[in-house]
Amino acid sequence: MKIALIGYGKMGRMIEQIALERGHEIVCKIDVDNPQDFDSPEFESADVAIEFTNPLAAYDNYLKAFKHHVKVVSGSTGWMKDHQAEVEALCKDGQNTLFWASNYSVGMAIFQAVNRYLAKIMNGFKQYDVTMEETHHVHKLDAPSGTAITLAEEILDNMDRKDKWVKGFQHNADGTEEGTNDVAADELPIASIRRDEVPGIHTINYDSDADLISITHDAHSRKGFALGAVLAAEYTVNHTGLLTTSDLFKF
């Protein structure tokens, strides 16, 4: 499989390493200093592009790839608020292909399945209130994380007493703090912590007067995300439309 990399930071380099180990070819690497390479023959030859950049660049990167009929696997978060409808229209009926996930870790896919099942159970036990906390490195621009939002929306889909998620307590990269987890009964607060070089920790708590039930996914490194992205690329080569981890992992 021929792969183009969009974004060649720590994640891009790790994806490159794993892709090469799995016998794939990297035909193009695009970063901030060579955006003109979107129009290169090398990029156009790619079977799929793997994109890990930032919320501000992601949507435009999709458009540039689609222009050359290149399928995209993306782990960038924070763009859906402004561009979800446009991307859905662009990928309708398989005219373009985007595999998007907020988190590509195989462990996170399992964690999401546990999260959905636990929320379904907890729907019948109103004495438990649910909160969430996510912790990431200080370079992450968006808060809450895309993964936390995905987890929260899966809880909302399975829990009648919660209507929406909201930002909770925030510990910012500069050390300042704001917000609170003291929210309305129908709201699910997501606390966001930015510290050090943490790859990603997501914890969901169900608390009652009697006890606390907690589940946590703690990523040790970016390696799990990189492997999942390459697995997604291998899947995307033979599929079309708007895809995500529920297509790849059948839990």
Image (cartoon, rainbow, N blue to C red):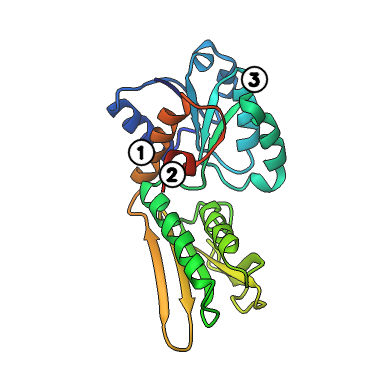
Calculate the distance from the C-alpha at mark 1 to the C-alpha at mark 3: 27 Å
**Residue 184, image x, y percentages:** 67, 77
Q: Indicate which disc residue 227 carries.
A: 1
The reply to whether the C-beta atoms of the residues labelled 1 and 3 are less than 8 Å apart is no
Q: Indicate which disc residue 104 carries.
A: 2
The first of marks 1 and 3 along the sequence is 3
Q: In which quarter of the image is the N terminus?
A: top left
Q: What element carries label 3?
A: helix
| Residue farthest top in this picture | 41
Calculate the distance from the C-alpha at mark 2 to the C-alpha at mark 1: 8 Å
In the picture provided, is 104 more to the left or to the right than 97? left
Which amino acid type is shown beneath numbered disc 2? Tyr
Q: Which of 168 and 40 is in front in this view?
A: 168
Q: Which residue in the protein does label 3 denote?
A: 67
Q: Measuring 64% from the left and 23% from the top, which residue is drawn there?
A: 95
Calculate the distance from the C-alpha at mark 2 to the C-alpha at mark 3: 25 Å
Which amino acid type is shown beneath numbered disc 1? Leu
